Image (tube, rainbow, N blue to C red):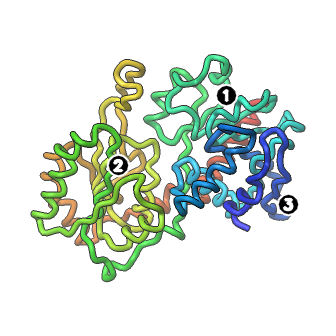
Amino acid sequence: MDVAERIRANSASLPHGGTDASLVPAAPGDERMTLNLFFEERDDRWFPGDRHVRPVLRRMLLGKSWISGQRRVFLNLCAGLDRVGIRYRVNDYGYIRKHPNELACIIGRPFVLDWFEWKNPLLLGVAMYNHPVDAPGHLKDLHTRTILVPCDWYAQMCRPYWPHIEVWPVGIETDLWTPTPTAQKSIDVLLYDKVRWDHERYESELIGPIRRHLEASGRSVEVIRYGRYNEDGYKAALARCRSMVFLCEHESQGIACQQALSSGVPVFAWDRGGPWQDPAYFPDKVRYEGGVSSVPYFDARCGRTFIDTAGFISGWSDFWSQVTAGGFAPRDYVMDNLTLEKGALHYYGIAEAVMQRRMR
């Protein structure tokens, strides 16, 4: 039974009752602690437990659901823990309430903190608040907790509020996101449109001009829009395409981009830098000027970056020449830094350090 099946098997559990979550078997002689993982994407809305019913009804009405970034983080963490043999419980609220000295790892949304009075040491994140200013006033002790964020620039933004920040990127399923032989590729460029704000403006200033330049250069282009595809469709698109142009204002990790890299697809990424410009916060609520990135995990093996349309046009020929010459090795970067196993061991190391600090 894989982790997704274990989650479904426990989906009828109530937050205040707990579950009999099965454990991943440990290797003989393994004395590592068992992790207590808690992941919830949504709170109850109309009656206790309806958070489990709503996704089922949605799937019945609309078909297979899109996997959110938060759920992908949780699933990949569990898959990595499976591979390295680290045991864990999933959403076993009954157990954690009876064992207040054990670490509770709350990966999902922070409303779980309001379900009962947690007595346990906590490891929080990476799916917490978008910014510390969103944390409600009654959670006064968050500055004493260890909180995970996915990348360095995000950590720098949050650290003035939460001093015990740790950077943790989840691993990528490298055995699922694998390269397709070049001879089987039929499309030159996958244009990945994840422009989230002021899309009409950027369609005129960035997306449209980039597409027209590619087509004028004789390149075939396939467009994919964030939130309008499922993973199977994205995987098939990567299998068809020789390269990817990635358009996003900023990323805290950039799992979709890293799935492309794992698939051996070089990326030309819009990386404008500058302040964090999420319009829900900027410029009135939060001003972080430290510099954001759309590719926080990236090096020369992965591809190239550009700042604006002019930078794309001036840099495209060199990027494409490297693609056709086989000059990039994006999968090597992922294998060196972002495998499921590396992510799981990193997470466990942080969890272990939290407990060691508590015992000092």
Front position in the image: 228 or 180: 228
The type of residue carrying mark 3 is: Gly
As drawn, the label of residue 145 is: 1
Quarter occupied by the N terminus: bottom right
Instruction: Let me know if residue 359 appears in the view.
Output: no
| Mark 3, secondary structure of its residue | loop
At label 2, the amino acid type is Lys
Which of the pair 105/232 is nearer the observer? 232
Tell us which disc is closer to us: 1 or 3: 1
Query: Which numbered dot is residue 69?
Result: none
> How many angstroms separate mark 3 from mark 2 (CA)?
47 Å
Earlier along the polypeptide chain: callout 1 or callout 3?
3
Q: Which residue is mark 2?
A: 194
- Residue that extends furthest to the left in the rendered view of this protein: 216
Whole-percent x and y of residue 78?
Answer: 67, 56
Q: Nearer the viewer, mark 3 or mark 2?
A: 2
Residue at (16% x, 61% y) in the render = 214
Judging by the rendered image, the residue that carries numbered circle 3 is: 29
Q: Is residue 164 left or right of residue 118?
A: left
Residue lying at 65% horizontally and 33% vertically, measured from the top left: 111
Which image quadrant is residue 274 in? top left
Give coordinates of residue 158: x percent, y percent.
50, 27
Residue located 68% across and 38% down the image? 46
Amino acid bearing label 1: Arg
What secondary structure is found at the residue carrying circle 1? Answer: loop
Q: What percent of the width, then of the height, locates residue 295? A: 37, 47
Q: Earlier in the sequence, mark 2 or mark 1?
A: 1
Decide: few, some or many residues near mark 1? Use Cα within 10 Å; few <14, some 14-19, many ≥20.
Answer: some
